[in-house]
Image (cartoon, grey):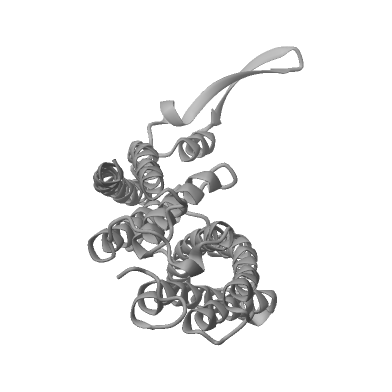
Amino acid sequence: MTTNLATYSVVLTYSAMAVYVIAFIAFALDMAKRSGDVAAATAGTAPRASSAEKTVATVRGGTVVLERVDQSSDDDDAGSRRGTRFERVGMAMTVLALVLHVGSVVLRGIAADRVPWGNMFEFSLTGTALIILIFLLVQFWQNLKFLGVFITGLTIILLGIGTVNYYVPVRPLVPALESYWLVIHVFVAIAGTGFFALGAGLAVAQLVQTYRQGRGPTGKLRFMATLPDADRLEVLTYRVLLVGFVLWTFTLIAGAIWAERAWGRYWGWDTKEVWTFIIWVVYAGYIHARATRGWRGARSSWLALIGFAAVMFNFSVVNVFFKGLHSYSGL
């Protein structure tokens, strides 16, 4: 039964990856559509007057006067809120893929009879699902659908690497992981990583927007004209990464408490502990730099990307190639 559930989990994982690819293509087509719309607008191919204007009746001195009112801006705002057809397809496919993805995580957990993040494969499986979930939930706060290409592309890469290179059969946990802190510490770390990923996407968009605005109107990167300006993107990056930093701070503290329970000391300069602290320092530096006026803009965004690079290094290199008390990935 356990073997069957694990097999079904893998099938759902590959199915989710296939749907994520469709979502990625849809989001890419959405960017192309945005570029085409901007190019058409700058070329002077505006909508006909009948579609851009409406006739309203007003009363002036007892006389009814008919006036034409430009409503193109209202239509543009409404269209922006609705999004393009490709964007809606991308979001729908992302939701469908997440359903399959969560099903895979649940089946893996049932097969293992524990939380499904006890090794590198399971961490990859659960972590990418949480990245997508955070991306979708954030839409209720702010429209960040333009990050769909980045988030789905990152998910496909991480999930593919985890499935191909890190897969291991279901097996019991090592003694050090048999603790309720596994649920708390690792889950919060995964959630923090999800916000860091979203912040990295915003930082990339902010850098591209800064480059574009600095060069003035050009024929390149037309789709960026439909995104928020560089200042707004910087503010969004800061807010998202602030949430991730709070979660990572809790991760660092919870890890120290768990280390004392498991190994009898709060800190031992283990490679994993050191890199967790390095990540915390980089993002703390980002927050401090963002609060200093001279480090706003592109400089702070580059620092945010350095932080995310440290997160990826911690996940892909430290967990695999560095030996220590945290070497329990099962590889």
Which residue occupies the extreme bottom position in the image?
269
Q: Nearer the viewer, residue 241 or 275?
A: 275
Q: Is residue 201 left or right of residue 29?
A: right
Identify whether 130 is placed above or below 68: below
Judge whether residue 226 can be spotted in this image.
no
Quadrant position of the C terminus in the picture? bottom left
Q: Nearer the viewer, residue 282 or 113?
A: 113
Q: Is residue 187 left or right of residue 152?
A: right
Residue 138: where, in percent of width, then height?
A: 54, 48
Residue 39: where, in percent of width, then height?
A: 33, 51
Residue 196: where, in percent of width, then height?
A: 51, 64
Q: Is residue 221 left or right of residue 209?
A: left
Q: Nearer the viewer, residue 135 or 297?
A: 135
Residue 327: where, in percent of width, then height?
A: 40, 76
Q: Nearer the viewer, residue 198 or 235?
A: 198
Labels in figure, total: 0
Judge whether residue 85 can be spotted in this image.
yes
Which residue occupies 30% across, 62% down? 162
Identify whether 121 is placed above or below 40: below
Which residue occupies 34% across, 76% down? 320
Which residue occupies the extreme right position in the image?
61
Identify whether 47 is placed above or below 264: above
Identify whether 142 is placed above or below 325: above
